[in-house]
Image: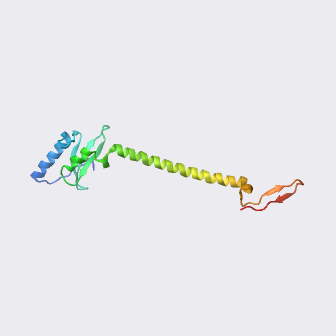
Amino acid sequence: MSRFAANGTLWMTPATIGALLDIDRRVKDGDESGWRGDPTMGLFYNQQLARFEVWGLDVTGKEYLAAANENLDVRIIEQLRNGAPENDPFQRVIDNNLRIKAEAEKAERERVAALADKLAWGIRQDFGQHLGGKKIMHAVTEDHKIKETAPCN
């Protein structure tokens, strides 16, 4: 659920409303804990997951989930201050690049292994009589008679 789709109703007591407004103000303006604040962020309640979420806008204008917590308390601010590593867009890009690189290396290893099998088969076919192939090889003698050589393994 995105910040634009969060349109549900949440029943709150006056104390909870005060806490909600304080957390929302701290998300936008910053606080003494070291969080600088971001005016593009907002505090929302996700009814499907039953948790509070802080959504923000990145430089391209796309929304992203910056922090989430089931309780309305300062842990949301702490996640924002610490960068919420599970939601860090840079780390997601780095992880995605590493995954793509690992898949490409695996595909290259498989391609090289298949090529090696084909090459080994070709060598056995061409040089089997010298390398212990399983074919019975034929040779032409000096008197132009065909002579069978011993079968190889």
Residue farthest along the left direction in this orientation: 14
Which quarter of the rendering shows the C terminus? Answer: bottom right
Horizontal arrangement in the rendering, residue 134 relative to residue 86 (left or right): right
Residue farthest along the right direction in this orientation: 143
Where in the figure is residue 102, as x and y percent of width and height?
Answer: 46, 49
Where in the figure is residue 91, as x and y percent of width and height?
Answer: 35, 45
Where in the figure is residue 74, as x and y percent of width and height?
Answer: 19, 49
Q: Looking at the picture, tell me which residue is in the foreground, 91 or 2.
A: 91
Classify residue 36 by image quadrant. Answer: top left
Q: Is residue 3 visible?
A: no
Tell me which residue sits at (69%, 52%) in the image: 123
Residue farthest along the top direction in this orientation: 59
Q: Looking at the picture, tell me which residue is in the foreground, 50 or 78.
A: 78
Horizontal arrangement in the rendering, residue 36 relative to residue 104 (left or right): left
Here the colouring is rainbow
| 109 in relation to 133, above or below | above
Q: Is residue 114 visible?
A: yes
Tell me which residue sits at (17%, 43%) in the image: 26
Tell me which residue sits at (80%, 60%) in the image: 149
Question: How many numbered marks appear?
Answer: 0
Tell me which residue sits at (31%, 47%) in the image: 85
